Image: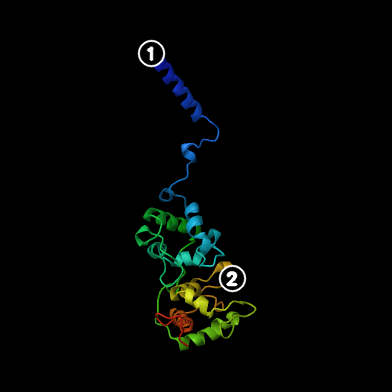
Amino acid sequence: MRMRRIGAAAVLALVFVAACDGLPGKPKESDRPLSPWQVKSFTVLFSGNCAGCHGAGGRFGAAYELANPTFQALVDDAALTGIVSQGMAGTAMPPFAHKYGGFLTDAQIGILVDGMRRRWRVGAAPPNAPPLAGGGGDPARGAQVFARSCAPCHGADGEGSPKAPGSIVDPSYLTLVSDDAIRTLIVAGRTDLGHPDWRGYPPGQPLSAQQVADVVAWMAAKRPRFVPGSYARNP
């Protein structure tokens, strides 16, 4: 008799468990959110980590236009992976790789880089393009190049014009942007904002690698210099 009661109780318990398992609203295992390191979707990874600065679809963000085909053609996989993994020193671009203090695995960074390539890289690098990294510019020569090639849009002093009203010599902007970022903008342009690449200053008069370096040096010379340990700024 006692064994029958125990058996009946066990059967009843199984019935209750089965009934509870079928209650409306109980999430299925497939409905549970993925842990951050389990995300393998480019769209989800880009939206959650990149779009806030670079814009949805890689365009019209405060940071550089990643969907620019010229940029994607000029930058190689190693450089793009390094930027995503380690960030860019002296800018608001943070590192995203775990080993550099970020939140993404190497596999997820690979998904981001591969996804950008598949979506936004079109064809090979244009011939005779200046490199995206470099130095050795001269501010005095850069002033001359700027007056001839850039001032028609950005104004004689770089503080803007009706065609391009924003100031490119604003201290806050220059503090937040690195020399490499300025160089990338000059070389690859920004298709989303109508800014030409190095071949359109003006069309038919492309900038040489040295001219690009000189303009970068001219802008960098206008960047505010801060005294260590103080909020005072050198004149």
Residue 33 shows up from this direction: yes
Q: Which mark is residue 146?
A: none
Assess disc 1: are there few (<14), some (14-19) or many (≥20) residues with their C-alpha within 10 Å of its C-alpha. Answer: few
Above or below 119: residue 223: below
Reading the image, the residue beneath label 2 is 194
Furthest residue to the left? Answer: 99
Tell me the element at label 2. Answer: loop
Furthest residue to the top? Answer: 1
Above or below 87: residue 128: below
In the foreground, 92 or 26:
26
The image shows residue 157 at horizontal and vertical percentages of 56, 85
Furthest residue to the right? Answer: 162
Assess disc 2: are there few (<14), some (14-19) or many (≥20) residues with their C-alpha within 10 Å of its C-alpha. Answer: few
Identify the amino acid type marked 2: Gly
Tell me the element at label 1. Answer: helix
In the foreground, 52 or 127:
52
Q: Residue at x 54, y 62 (%)?
A: 55
Above or below 177: residue 36: above
Q: Is residue 99 left or right of residue 60?
A: left
The image shows residue 120 at horizontal and vertical percentages of 50, 60
Reading the image, the residue beneath label 1 is 2
Mark 1–mark 2 Cα distance, whole angstroms, equals 85 Å
Which badge, 1 or 2, is on the more N-terminal residue? 1
Identify the amino acid type marked 1: Arg
Asked if the residue at tag 2 contacts the one at tag 1, i.e. Cβ–Cβ closer than 8 Å, the answer is: no
Q: Is residue 140 left or right of residue 193?
A: left
